[in-house]
Image: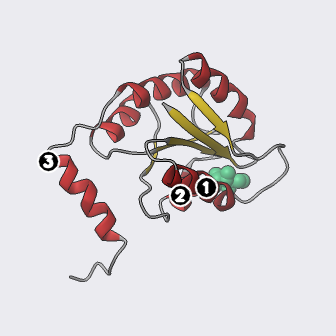
């Protein structure tokens, strides 16, 4: 699999660890920054990663901030992105199986390295189930096209 990774300053300390782990599993990972632990705004890096995933068909992303919340909310504003904030192997596996997630998000202040390895394994090893989930995933796109009043 091919991944793009980006963080904010509160996720920066995990970036090299995640890159090494993903590479050790035989996947490719492209670092979109930041290049230091200086304070940055997570929407800027969410956007970089989300745009890369959208422009590179079949690729995936990993986004890390302090909680994983801000960076996942931001990435999900980009059309075609399904960025899942995960906390364990179960959520990482289910978001591939049911949501066809294309970006794995987590919080550096929330999960430890062992859990991160398990999440990456689960995300990589679980295919999208399709079937009844395919229609629901296409309705996710519909959600961004109008109000919720109908
Ligand atoms: C940065 O302090 C922090 O707010 C950010 O990393 C993230 O947790 C926001 O959702």
Extreme residue in the left direction: 132
Q: Residue at x 61, y 59 (%)?
A: 47
Percent coordinates x, y for residue 39 in the rendering? 82, 54
Percent coordinates x, y for residue 37 in the rendering? 83, 44
Q: Which residue is mark 3?
A: 132
Label located before the other in sequence (1 or 2)? 1
Whether pointer 3 and pointer 1 mark residues with C-beta atoms closer than 8 Å, the reply is: no
Percent coordinates x, y for residue 38 in the rendering? 85, 49
Q: Is residue 117 above or below residue 77?
A: above
Q: Residue at x 60, y 27 (%)?
A: 112
Q: Residue at x 55, y 61 (%)?
A: 74
* Helix, strand or loop status at disc 3: helix
Number of residues whose C-alpha sits closer than 10 Å to that of mark 2, classed few (under 14), some (14–19) or many (20 or more)? many
Which disc number belongs to residue 121? none
In terms of image quadrants, where is residue 91?
top left
Q: Is residue 11 above or below residue 121?
A: below
Label located before the other in sequence (3 or 1)? 1
Q: Residue at x 49, y 41 (%)?
A: 60
Gap in Å between the C-alphas at discs 3 and 2?
Answer: 25 Å
Whether pointer 1 and pointer 2 mark residues with C-beta atoms closer than 8 Å, the reply is: yes
Number of residues whose C-alpha sits closer than 10 Å to that of mark 1, classed few (under 14), some (14–19) or many (20 or more)? many
* Helix, strand or loop status at disc 2: helix
Q: Quadrant of the C terminus?
A: bottom left
Q: Is residue 79 above or below residue 10?
A: below
Report the number of numbered marks.
Answer: 3
Which disc number belongs to residue 75? 2
Gap in Å between the C-alphas at discs 1 and 2?
Answer: 5 Å
Q: Is residue 132 above or below residue 114?
A: below
* Helix, strand or loop status at disc 1: helix
Q: Which residue is mark 1?
A: 46
Q: 104 left or right of 21?
A: left
Whether pointer 3 and pointer 2 mark residues with C-beta atoms closer than 8 Å, the reply is: no
């Amino acid at each position: 699999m091919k991944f793009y990774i980006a963080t904010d300053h509160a996720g920066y300390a995990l970036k090299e660890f995640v890159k090494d782990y993903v590479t050790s599993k035989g996947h490719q990972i492209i670092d979109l920054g930041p290049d230091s632990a200086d304070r940055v705004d997570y929407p800027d890096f969410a956007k970089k990663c989300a745009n890369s995933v959208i422009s590179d068909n079949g690729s995936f992303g990993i986004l890390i901030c302090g909680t994983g919340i801000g960076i996942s909310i931001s990435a999900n504003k980009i059309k075609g992105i399904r960025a899942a904030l995960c906390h364990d192997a179960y959520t990482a596996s289910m978001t591939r199986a049911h949501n066809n997630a294309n970006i794995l998000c987590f919080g550096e202040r929330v999960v430890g390295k062992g859990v991160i390895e398990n999440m990456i394994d689960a995300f990589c090893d679980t295919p999208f189930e399709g079937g009844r989930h395919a229609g629901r995933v296409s309705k996710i796109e519909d959600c961004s096209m109008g109000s919720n009043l109908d």
